[in-house]
Amino acid sequence: MAPDTLPQSLSFLTNAAHLLATTSPQISAHLMTQRNSLMFHHDLQQSDVQRQRVCGCCGHIMIPGHGSEFKLETDKALRRMKSRKEKTRQPAAEEKSHTAHKTRKRLKCGMCGCSTTIAIPPPAPVHRRRLKLPTKIPQGRASQSSIYASTSASHDEHISSAEPTKPATANASSKKRAKTRKQGLQALLQQSQSASSKPQGGLGLSLSDFLKK
């Protein structure tokens, strides 16, 4: 058969087999067998969906509940057998084959009784993104920083409050000097006035007498 007409031939056999599945199951199975052999000669592999719909031995279209059986199996039986046996190291390839598929689908054909097993791959791992939280300062460092800030602030306040007192002390000392100077001048003035009021010896003349003349 030419490769150009292969898709049309496969689709024709598939549609015809599905149309005759309920009215004449034997003819439908024969058509699907011809379809499977045609795919085998052209090196075409069947997908898991096609394998679970059509029996690979007789070509019967398997419908669960209409003569065919459908089951889900797990690896519980394999685990029980492992627990009974002694623990031995297995090759990495065997370990991967056992752990890769833990659940499988088993379909039993209602016409020939053959079973088709389809492994269900495990779900893909979920990668969760971790949010970066803001870095927290340890309590010891935080307390030290707060103490340092408070001491520096109190030191600055002390310096700022002490600096304005300098001009006040300078003003007080200058006022005190002026006061003592004034008191000294007043004392000298009083002495001069008392000396001028007393009568002098000799002629009894003073500077005021010469000024009058």
Image (cartoon, grey):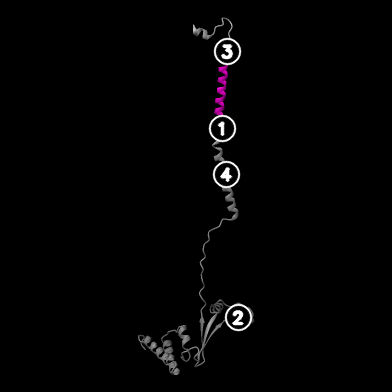
Residue 167 placed where, x, y %?
53, 33
What's drawn in magenta, residue-wise?
169-191
Residue wearing tag 2: 79
First reached walking from the N terminus: tag 2 or tag 1: 2
Query: Which secondary structure lies at badge 4?
Result: helix
Q: Marks 3 and 1: which is nearer the front? A: 3
- Asked if the residue at tag 1 contacts the one at tag 2, i.e. Cβ–Cβ closer than 8 Å, the answer is no
C-alpha separation, residue under disc 2 versus residue under disc 3: 136 Å
The disc, 3 or 1, on the residue closer to the chain's N-terminal end is 1
Q: Do the residues labelled 3 and 4 touch (CB within 8 Å)?
A: no
Residue drawn at x 57%, y 13% is: 195
| Residue 154 numbered tag | 4
Q: Which of 56 and 147 is in front in this view?
A: 147
* Dots 3, 1 in contact, CB < 8 A: no
Give the percent coordinates (x, y) of residue 64: 50, 88
Query: Relative to 39, does residue 169 appear above or below in the rendering?
Result: above
Q: Is residue 27 magenta?
A: no
Amino acid carrying label 1: it is: Thr
Residue assigned mark 3: 195
Residue 107 picture location, percent across and down = 51, 87
Q: Which of 195 and 106 is in front in this view?
A: 195
Residue 172: tell me if it is visible.
Answer: yes
What kind of residue is marked 3? Ala
- Do residues under tags 2 and 3 come within 8 Å of each other at their CB atoms? no
Expressed as whole percent of the image width and height from the top left, the position of residue 75 reads: 57, 81
Q: Residue drawn 59% across and 50% down?
A: 144
Q: What element carries label 2?
A: helix
- Looking at the rendered image, the disc whose residue lies closer to the viewer, 1 or 4, is 1
Q: What element carries label 3?
A: helix
